[in-house]
């Protein structure tokens, strides 16, 4: 089961600030809770799409491409460090396709034709169309990796983009582009796959593969747990109202009865998981001094501040104010 969890790390927000966009403005335009921008936050595919659309709305049609350019100029996420040490472009693309699952439910579709090799991307969990900026920045990342790691000006054979013409994009890719296409497709000459990477390191790749394969294995185990899936969906739904079994079951595409049965088999109940999740998230929010207690109650899905206070006293044996004071001083 592919889980709809996207990691949006500091790379995105740092790049947004680099092109003059504030995270508060992006979140407001995307209609997403501020917690999305917290450290190591995860979101759904459609929430991630909403962020990219907000960037385009606030900064113009090429803003998402500019953001992608700023991202590749910054620090790579850990699971992409190994790309610089791949044997050649083909090796890097295959590794990228394998380990992309660690940061997003995204699928790279790789096809070999006569003297050419094409890449397209899809998001199986998405309920809305892929924003132009996501495709632009993904293809930019592929080509930038090829140019940086081979130390040559690699140009694609051609590109298909489902967006309007952009001189900036046309100039950067420096290849024939078909605009207003039905979907996005990046095409390299087949011979480009053999272009050697200047920092190829077999021993380091073996070490990184061991670590990343272990992360994939752990992620697979977590994805198989209905309890952990419920925790994640609850975390995402808390700030948009009081989550219930019906809404979470709908998110997970299972019946309420089936979800209850699976949770019982794992030794849990929905109400227990809801309470535990609220408890954990409440402490995370209380650790942020800028948040008012009334805001925290709202973000946890409580109808009023009193309900939050009573629940917290059951969890910790003290009021939220006392807990915050004690823990911020320690």
Image: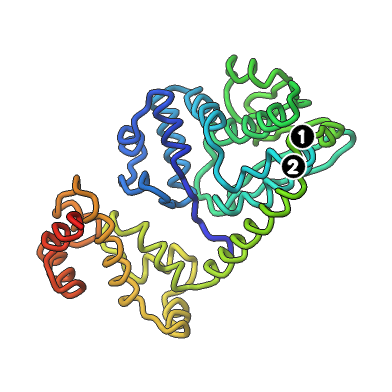
Does the residue at mark 1 contact the one at mark 2 (Cβ under 8 Å)? Answer: yes
* Residue 11 spot, x, y in % from top left: 48, 38
Quarter of the rendering containing residue 247: bottom left
* Residue 32 spot, x, y in % from top left: 34, 44
Figure check: 297 above or below 277? above
Q: Nearer the viewer, residue 53 or 300?
A: 300
- Residue indicated by mark 1: 197
Counting labels gives 2
Figure check: 214 above or below 69? below
Figure quadrant of the N terminus: bottom right
* Label 2 CA crowd tier, 10 Å (few <14, some 14–19, many 20+): many
* Residue 101 spot, x, y in % from top left: 60, 53
Q: Earlier in the sequence, mark 1 or mark 2?
A: 2
Mark seen at residue 86: 2
Give the Cα separation between the discs numbered 1 and 2: 6 Å
Q: Which residue is at 66% across, 60% downward?
A: 213
Q: Which residue is at 59% across, 53% downward?
A: 124
> At numbered mark 1, what does the secondary structure look like: helix, strand or loop?
loop
Q: Is residue 191 left or right of residue 183?
A: right
Q: Nearer the viewer, residue 3 or 177?
A: 3
Q: Is residue 23 left or right of residue 50?
A: left
Q: Nearer the viewer, residue 283 or 309?
A: 283
């Amino acid at each position: 089961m592919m889980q709809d969890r996207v990691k949006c790390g500091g790379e995105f927000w740092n790049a947004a600030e680099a092109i003059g966009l504030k995270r508060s403005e992006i979140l407001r335009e995307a209609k997403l809770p501020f917690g999305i921008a917290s450290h190591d936050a995860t979101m759904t595919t459609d929430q991630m799409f909403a962020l990219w659309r907000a960037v385009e709305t606030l900064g113009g049609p090429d803003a998402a491409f500019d953001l992608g350019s700023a991202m590749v100029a910054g620090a790579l996420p850990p699971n992409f460090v190994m790309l610089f040490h791949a044997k050649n472009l083909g090796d890097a693309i295959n590794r990228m396709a394998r380990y992309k699952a660690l940061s997003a439910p995204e699928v790279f579709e790789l096809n070999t034709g006569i003297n050419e090799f094409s890449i397209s991307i899809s998001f199986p969990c998405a309920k809305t169309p892929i924003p132009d900026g996501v495709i632009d920045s993904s293809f930019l990342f592929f080509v930038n990796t090829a140019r940086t790691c081979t130390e040559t000006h690699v140009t694609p054979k051609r590109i298909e983009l489902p967006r309007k013409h952009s001189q900036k994009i046309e100039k950067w890719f420096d290849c024939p582009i078909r605009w207003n296409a039905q979907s996005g497709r990046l095409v390299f000459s087949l011979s480009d796959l053999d272009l050697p990477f200047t920092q190829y390191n077999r021993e380091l790749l073996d070490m990184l593969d061991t670590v990343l394969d272990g992360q994939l294995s752990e992620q697979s185990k977590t994805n198989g747990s209905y309890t952990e899936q419920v925790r994640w969906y609850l975390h995402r739904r808390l700030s948009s109202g009081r989550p219930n079994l019906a809404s979470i079951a709908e998110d997970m595409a299972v019946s309420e009865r089936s979800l209850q049965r699976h949770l019982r088999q794992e030794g849990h109940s929905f109400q227990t998981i809801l309470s535990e999740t609220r408890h954990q998230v409440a402490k995370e929010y209380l650790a942020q001094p800028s948040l008012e207690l009334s805001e925290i109650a709202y973000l946890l899905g409580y109808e009023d501040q009193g309900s939050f206070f009573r629940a917290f006293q059951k969890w910790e044996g003290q009021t939220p104010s006392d807990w915050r004071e004690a823990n911020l001083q320690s």
